[in-house]
Image (cartoon, rainbow, N blue to C red):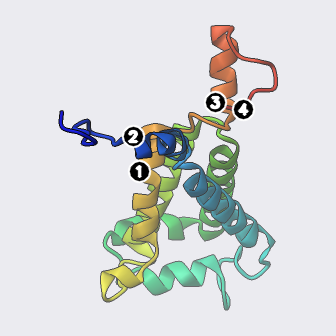
Amino acid sequence: MTHGMHTDAHPPYLDGDRGWRDTASRYALLPLRVFLGVTFIYAGLDKLTDSAFMKDSGAGSIGDMMRAVRDSSAIPAMVDMALDNPVGFGYAIAFGELAVGIGTLIGLFARLAALGGALISLSLWLTVSWASDPYYYGNDLPYMFCWVPLVLAGAPYWSLDALIRRRRRGRGQAGSWQ
């Protein structure tokens, strides 16, 4: 080694940043969890509290929306199933969004919640937003891909899953979220 030159991968002046980088990496998915959780809770509550949405027909109804997208969807048979009982389908979507949002936000069954979110987004992309042209104008496809990191990683920090895991191992503290 020559005077003053370091050949290691991280120069000494960066070593102080290692702790910050490790922390940032550890919690990198937390903003995504919060965003998707809050968004899906809001979407579910919005549907449940919209008196026009939970109807077979009429302006703003789930029934009229599904009839409007039927012929332009990727899988018309999927829309036909929803049209068998549009109000039931509307409630299923709304309660599914609530369950996914709550599970994601608090980190309970986080991978399962994320998978549910991905499937809801996929079904909405294949039906409601399929005809968006160009395709990236439809918001359901990006949402579907936003769920993938949470399906893979779950909620290892600041979650009920982590708390339960620590309690099972007998190492955690009663109130620890990390």
The first of marks 3 and 2 along the sequence is 2
Q: Is residue 28 above or below residue 88?
A: above
Q: Please give the residue where the numbered disc 1 appears in the rendered image.
A: 148
Mark 1 → mark 2, Cα distance in angstroms: 36 Å
Looking at the rendered image, the quarter that the N terminus falls into is top left
Instruction: Find disc 4 in the rendering and name its residue.
Output: 177
Q: Which residue is mark 3?
A: 161
Of residues 66 and 5, which is closer to you in this image?
5
Which comes sooner in the sequence, label 4 or label 2?
2
* Circle 3 Cα neighbour tier, 10 Å, few/some/many (<14 / 14–19 / ≥20): many
Residue 160 visible (yes or no): yes
Q: Residue at x 67, y 49 (%)?
A: 105
Q: Is residue 129 above or below residue 175?
A: below
Which one is closest to the eye, mark 4 or mark 1? 4
Label whose residue precedes the other's in the sequence (4 or 1): 1
Q: Quadrant of the C terminus?
A: top right
Q: Secondary structure at mark 2?
A: helix
**Extreme residue toward the front, this view:** 3
Query: CB atoms at circles 1 and 3 under 8 Å apart?
Result: no
Q: Residues within 10 Å of mark 2 (few under 14, many from 20)?
A: few
The residue shown at (52%, 71%) is 83
Inter-mark Cα distance, 3 to 2: 37 Å
Density class for disc 1 (Cα within 10 Å; few <14, some 14-19, many ≥20) is some
Q: Nearer the viewer, mark 3 or mark 2?
A: 2
Cα distance in 3D space between marks 4 and 1? 23 Å
User: What amino acid type should be assigned to the residue bearing mark 4?
Assistant: Trp
- Would you name the residue on which mark 2 appears? 12
How far apart, in angstroms, are the residues tagged by discs 4 and 2? Answer: 33 Å
Label located before the other in sequence (4 or 3): 3
Which residue is rendered at x = 44% and y = 39% of the image? 15
Q: Position of residue 68 (x, y in %)?
A: 48, 87
Q: Secondary structure at mark 4?
A: loop
